[in-house]
Image: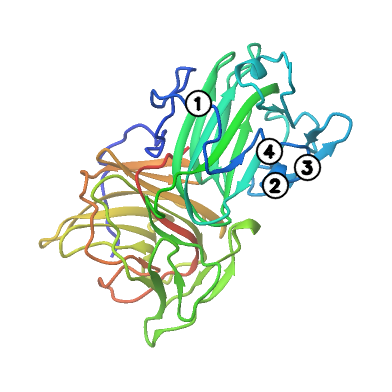
Amino acid sequence: MVLRFALLGLLAACSQSLFDNNGGNRDGGTGGEMPVASTCTAPCVGDAAADFDGSPGGANGRWRYLEDLRDRTWVPMTLEQASGVMIGANTNNRIGVCKPGATEHACQALPGALLVSAAGTVAPADPAIELKAPMNQVVQISLKVAMPINADPQVVRLYRNSREDVLFTGTVQPGMTLETSITIDALANERILFALAADTAVQDVGVQLFVSGTGATFPQSCQLAIAFGVAMGNGVDNLCGGDYTFQDYNTGATTPVLAAGPFAEQGMAADITPDKYYEGTNLVMRSGDTTLQFWLRHDMLVPSYSAWPFSDLDLDNTGGIGVVLYDQSGLKLEVNTCTGAGNPLTFAGDRMVYPVDGAWHFVRVVHKAGVVNVCLDGKREFSFAAPAGSLASQFRPHLGRNVVWLPSGAFYDGGLDDVRVFTGALPCE
């Protein structure tokens, strides 16, 4: 049965992470009031400026200096021996460091900072730096960006693993300094990246990027993180606690099937065919704001059935989230929640046209301040109202099946990867 919903409300796009715990932007942008520290506090996981020494990994091999090709591929920069600066294939994409006595505006504003130059959108890539998290750890990411006085306003990004998985996006005004600080649960080997996503060419932008351990017990905000990197018996690990068992609807637990993920650095992904699904052991806690996100590759629909990549819908008590694909004059992706457990059941939600391209797409569902924002590939697509706490469910998440509800069965055919649930709201773009 295909459910139909009216649009219940459109609010502003997911623009700022609630994980942004400082964020004092001196350029008048969004964020809090507290200034960001000027040094990398102990224990310092990585200091992008202090670690820069012209080697491919910087001091201690912590970093990569890259061109972000904006298509989930990254190309390492090379060292220009004469200048000690890292250079991209487009030589206007450059990363160096402020030297003692430097007179550039950015070096005056942020002594010892990296100096980043970008070719802008005339080039197919942005200059970027990457730090790989050494272990499961609660970290604080602190960013300062100083824009030259004679520059145009420019966009900067902090993201995890790919541009779609955005942590922060901000615009830095000429002659001003942007500051933001974000605390996240970082998983071992996942990539934290900064990119200067300049619209126009710009030279000598000052960048300080610190990543420090907070000392907090891991995890703090992460409830669910399934990377599908390795199958363990009949299941896969929830890296934030618990496990997920791969089920055959007819025969019970079976060996997970994995395939290539959305990009090389992401590794393997789940490959799910009809009658197969993953069942979790933990409930998702949604007393406040939450973020659900995952990579989705839709292969095909089973005729006459809807396909549910994610569901913990609670039709007995109301609540939960369902993400479903179906054919209604073309392929649609819908996100909904149960609002009434009587007869008939009632739901809130909305839908969008979903690409019929067999490619990987990034889905993010953000519940913040009584509104659910649904985002695809880093862009908000639709919203609907849901009071705080109303998405709580008494059913464990299912991947590839709509929990136990009729029609009984598992009809999803496609891939899933990097399924995560966080306490708190992340932005769309």
The tag earlier along the polypeptide, 2 or 3, is 3
Q: Which of marks 4 and 1 is in front?
A: 4
Q: Which amino acid does label 2 sit on?
A: Asn
Q: Which amino acid does label 1 sit on?
A: Glu
Residue under pointer 3: 55
Residue under pointer 2: 60
Q: Which of marks 2 and 1 is in front?
A: 2
Q: Nearer the viewer, mark 2 or mark 3?
A: 2
In the rendered view, tell whether residue 199 sits above or below residue 130: above
| Callout 2 secondary element | helix
| Callout 4 secondary element | loop
Which residue is rendered at x = 64% and y = 21% of the image? 111
**Cα separation between marks 4 and 3:** 10 Å
In the rendered view, tell whether residue 357 sits above or below residue 370: below
Residue 203: % across, % down = 71, 21
**Which residue is most to the right?**
82
The tag earlier along the polypeptide, 4 or 1, is 4
Residue under pointer 4: 51
